[in-house]
Amino acid sequence: MSSGMRAETDAIVIGAGPVGLFAIFQLGMLRLKCHVVDALPAIGGQLTALYPEKPIYDIPGYPKIVAADLVHRLTEQAAPFHPRYHLDVAVEGLARLPDGRWEVTLSDGRAMIAPVVIIAAGAGAFGPNRPPLDGLAAFEGKSVFYLVQRREQFRGQRVVIAGGGDSAVDWAISLSDVADRVMVVHRRPKFRAAPESEARLAALAAEGRIDLVVPYQLHSLEGSDGRLEAVVVATTGSQTRRLEADALLPFFGLASSLGPIAKWGLEMDGAQIRVASSTLATNLPGVFAIGAVAGYPGKLKLILQGFSAAAMAAHASHAVARPDQALHFEHSTSTGVPVA
């Protein structure tokens, strides 16, 4: 692999969800630079992919904050430290170099080298559950999307949303403000969304702002050169219906897996990486795990505990990345935000 494809930094953060984003900030406060890898095409992990418009009530200082807003604020908080994001790419290999640093290789052939690796991969790398449609790949990224990064992208368009969970319902409600037409395809009349969201969906349908196409399932796509012209849906009795459309958003959840991470020689407790509760260190020197992927006694599955773990791992990382520098703990009120 050529040296031009190998980036060197202080820390590699695997996972750009809320805990990974806060780890960037904590590393930056200690003047440690980092590269960040995520298999999803957008920052925010599950908050962005599954429930961007859902309110969260247990973030300290925010009686209520919408998930997408929390991602935005965490990204803004990390921005002064100029992290390098590598999105829509998976991690593959982890190898210890002769000098003690780690080389992380990516699915696109690139590699990064750092003395510290912080795994903040949530429940693992996420990927969309794709519907079994012939020719689907030709439309992906052009008129078929598994994530919504900008609502304005669909202004004036005819949008078909498939699915019955929170993501499908939330985005149907949201896009009804900008799209020319929103059609929601679901195999049964009952949705699996929050009651208030389902009530809002029903109200918009009654107003004629959303078309509920039930009970139907996706059957086939019509179009060419990646440009969608229609989505054909069918009942279980094979009755079909043609929906003229410019975009299809299939929201059938995300499949998660640790993938290659599970083969890196990390000590595991089931699907979680075993860590020391005081430092979040794994059994591999210089490799830490935080957030949902980390397992230790007394852990709570809360974002706020992930934030605490990010701070602890960052401080433990300093001795690895800067072994010749003593770390004197200081509060941010004293130091401010260091200039990168």
Image (spheres, rainbow, N blue to C red):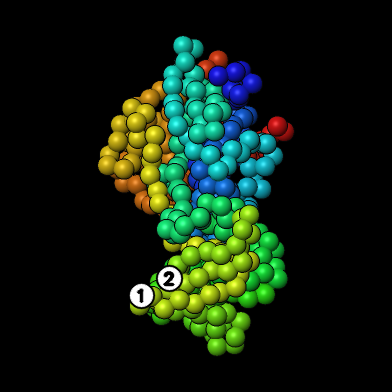
Coordinates of residue 253 in the picture (x, y in percent)? 43, 59
**Res 155 quadrant in image:** bottom right
Along the viewing direction, whichever of 317 and 255 lies nearer the viewer: 255
Give the residue type that dot 1 points to: Thr
Q: Which residue is at 45% across, 76% downward?
A: 240
Q: Which mark is residue 116?
A: none
For marks 2 and 1, the one nearer the N-term is: 2
Residue 20 sits above or below residue 160 on the image: above
**Quadrant holding the N terminus:** top right
Along the viewing direction, whichever of 305 and 76 lies nearer the viewer: 76
Residue 236 sits above or below residue 101 on the image: below
Q: Is residue 27 visible?
A: no
Coordinates of residue 336 in the picture (x, y in percent)? 68, 39
Q: Which residue is at 63% across, 42% downward?
A: 78
Q: Which residue is at 35% across, 77% downward?
A: 237
Coordinates of residue 133 in the picture (x, y in percent)? 45, 59
Q: Is residue 218 visible?
A: yes
Q: CA distance from mark 2 to mark 1?
A: 8 Å
**Res 234 quadrant in image:** bottom left
**Quadrant holding the C terminus:** top right
Sort mark 2 into few (<14), some (14-19) or many (20+) by Cα contacts within 10 Å: many
Tag 2, which secondary structure? strand
Give the residue type that dot 2 points to: Gln
Disc 2 target residue: 217
Q: Give the left or right position of residue 116, taking residue 333 as reference.
A: left
Disc 1 target residue: 236
Sort mark 1 into few (<14), some (14-19) or many (20+) by Cα contacts within 10 Å: few
Q: Which residue is at 45% across, 36% downward?
A: 119
Pointers 2 and 1 in contact (C-beta within 8 Å): yes
Q: Residue furthest top?
A: 98
Tag 1, which secondary structure? loop
